[in-house]
Image (tube, helix red, strand yellow):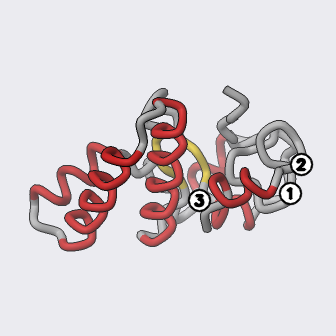
Amino acid sequence: SRLRVCVPLHASAMCKEGWQHPLSLEEVRQAADNEEAWAAKALDQLRRLERCAHNPAKLHLSYCAWLHRIASQQGRQRYADPATGLGVFTATALKTMACCGFHCRHCPHGQGPGGQLSPEEKLVLLDW
């Protein structure tokens, strides 16, 4: 896959206020089990995605877009990629940094995965 995960150039960037651990699918499920309304609504959306996506690659992209949206709504800086467990910065977090040139998944600087983004990639990957 052409998608890359952006990591900070300096470990100290992770210590800044607001750079919590990445939002994970498991965390959303636990919040729904604890009857948190935002998580229950998010899981409903996830179930609809799972019914509609028959291609595993498209389902992975859908999971990532979904987690990106939820993390952004919750004010989180990162989410955990469901396939790898690696932290992925949201576009909101990346907007606070200069472009690193690593073609981050949600790059707001126009340098998304593989370089310049196509219109289709912008719709899916820059879901913010």
Report which residue position mark 2 lands on: 116
Between label 3 and label 2, give the one nearer the viewer. 2
* Residue 123 point in image, percent of width and height: 67, 60
* Viewport quadrant of the C terminus: bottom right
Say what amino acid the circle numbered 1 marks.
Gly
Amino acid on which the number 3 mark rests in the picture: Lys
Q: Badge 1: how crowded within 10 Å, few (<14), some, or many (20+)?
A: some
Please, what secondary structure does the residue beneath circle 3 have?
loop
Q: The N terminus lies in which quarter of the figure?
A: top right
Residue type indicated by callout 2: Gln
Tell me the element at label 2: loop
Horizontal arrangement in the rendering, residue 23 relative to residue 46 (left or right):
right
Residue located 51% across and 57% down the image: 68
Measure the C-alpha gap from mark 1 to mark 2: 6 Å
Q: How far across and how far down the image is residue 34, in percent?
A: 10, 61
Q: Which mark is residue 16?
A: 3
The dot on residue 110 is 1
Place of residue 94 in the rendered image (x, y in percent of width and height, measured from the top left): 71, 59
Mark earlier in primary sequence (3, 2): 3
